[in-house]
Image (cartoon, rainbow, N blue to C red):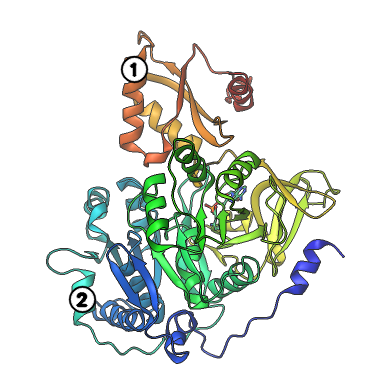
Amino acid sequence: MTSAAAAALAAKPLDFPPGFNAAVPFIDRHLAEGRGAKVAIRSASGEVTYGELAERVNRCGNALRGLGIEPGARVLMIVKDCPEFFYLFWGAIKAGIVPVPLNTLLRSGDYQYMIEDSGCAALFYSPEFAAEVEPALAGVGGKLGMALRTEGEGKTLRSLIGAASAELSASPASPTAECFWLYSSGSTGRPKGAVHLHRDMVVTSQYYGVDTLGAREDDVFFSAAKLFFAYGLGNGMTFPLWVGGTAVLLESRPSPDSTFETIIRFRPTLYFGVPTLYAAQLQALDQGAKPDLSSIRYCVSAGEALPAEIFRRWKEKTGLTILDGIGSTEALHIFISNSGGDSKPGSSGRPVVGYETRIVDDGGNPVPVGESGRLHIRGPSTAAYYWNQPEKTAATMLADGWVNTGDTYYCDADGYYYYCGRSDDMMKVGGIWCSPFEIEAKLVEHPKVFEAAVVGRADADALVKPEAWIVLAEGVVADDGVKQELLQHCKSGLAPYKYPRWIHFVDELPKTATGKIQRFKLRSEAASH
Ligand code: 3UK
């Protein structure tokens, strides 16, 4: 039997009662199970018990209905990691409304696109993001029914929650009814809304959270990856709510300082990071930081491949094991993973229970063990489709429930999976999607740029970052001043993680006879630098 088949076999069937609404097991169940007084959420601004959480979710669901938002309508969330994120997400779901958390690092143009694409009924945002959100609201004009800040002066989500009724019965749904969306970026074109179902969070919480990671009721979860990522949404919200544990939230940007402070103060038992952050934290440790990490049972990494060297140095410095696993927005969470008793540094691990995997060649035929090919996965948490994108849906969501991950992988004789790269031009920067074409488009917008090509280059920690090769416009002199000007141009117009870390000025770009940029030549050029 292949390891994939064995894993799928080991999965316990999940039980969904008639009319199943995901808010019932994640929120309401804890009252029935006597956890009302237990702390569900802990952050610098205080604590929220399971009892308070359930009540505020009800109030929020009623507030949304009171605003005239109909069941099935989408509400966009541009919300920092705070208790209101929970109230809004679960209040919507319980009321039959579809929440759509968005990346809070994006720019107004991205938000304007998502408002129009989703056809949402409302948008809620933390005041911190007003500078990018409000121009988007102005840009869509009358097309959006309503936008409200979560907190602050006047009418806000918080004031509405305070005034709404505390009683709400869950809107009847089903395991395969539409529940929430998450946007995922593509290499060309705009982000796609992946439509997830009511069962999906149950599947990821049980099969990865409990059965693979070993999460339990006495765990305290801290995810440096934000709740708006599928990764953070699981780590920092659905896993703790599934096992009746405690979620620790950090509102601000996850830096080595802020994450160490949070760990010292709240003593999490499970910590979730991305490779770039582990690398930065290691640097802080090398420079003398001595945080008490003794509360942590396991560290988890996902979003991009964890270099074996970071795994090794972290273990040496902290004594802690980082469990690398690959997940995706489409699968909702991790589907191939290392685990406590079963890990191989440098690999993504083995398939998570409940998921099947196959590695195929360009013709769709399985490749022999040890050979690389395209990774396809199948499991009960994958998105049903991309909103409004039948072609992209068909290219990714294949026949019989298989999903094309877009990743190239090989599997060794022991059943461990190794990441070899993407089959498109997309790159992960700090665990977040980054399209080279988007950075190129921003660069050529600048009058001093004639042509630009962006490729991924590995930094000293073996983590990929964007590198730009630029042909300047006629008569422009290549000097440090132009470099700074172009960097500033990128930083002000793109999400903050998308600027090129290296800029090279060249006389021309390598091209094919038909004028296509030969990125592979730039990549090998980069490798020889
Ligand atoms: C890449 C990895 C190698 C890979 C995610 C955990 O990253 C998540 O979702 P996204 O939709 O990106 C998916 C893509 O990211 N990737 C993620 N993890 C790894 N590559 N090793 C890894 N460990 O290209 C994949 O196709 O942003 C991660 C849980 C939920 C998630 N959504």
Q: What residue is disc 1 on? A: 482
Q: Which mark is residue 160?
A: 2
Q: Is residue 168 left or right of residue 400?
A: left
Q: Tell me if I can see residue 429 in this picture.
A: no
User: Ligand 1 closer than 8 Å to the CB at disc 1?
Assistant: no
Q: Quadrant of residue 449?
A: top left
Q: Nearer the viewer, residue 299 or 208?
A: 299
Label 1 amino acid? Answer: Val
Q: Nearer the viewer, residue 137 or 227?
A: 227
Q: Is residue 249 above or below residue 407?
A: below
Q: Tell me if I can see residue 525 in this picture.
A: yes
Label whose residue precedes the other's in the sequence (1 or 2): 2
Secondary structure at badge 1 equals helix
Q: Is residue 301 left or right of residue 241?
A: right
Within 10 angstroms of label 2, few (less than 14), some, or many (20 or more) residues?
some
Q: Is residue 492 above or below residue 186?
A: above
Residue at 68 percent across and 66 percent down: it is 401
Within 10 angstroms of label 1, few (less than 14), some, or many (20 or more) residues?
some
Q: Nearer the viewer, residue 121 or 61?
A: 61
Residue 237: percent from left, percent from top: 45, 68
Q: Quadrant of residue 94?
A: bottom left
Query: Which quarter of the rendering shows the C terminus?
Result: top right
Q: Is residue 27 left or right of residue 330?
A: left
Secondary structure at badge 2 equals helix
Q: Nearer the viewer, residue 301 or 257?
A: 257
Label 2 amino acid? Answer: Leu
Residue 103: percent from left, percent from top: 39, 53
Q: Is residue 190 left or right of residue 339?
A: left
Residue at 17 percent across and 63 percent down: it is 152
Which residue is situated farthest in the left direction here? 154
Residue 111: percent from left, percent from top: 34, 52
Q: Quadrant of residue 141?
A: bottom left
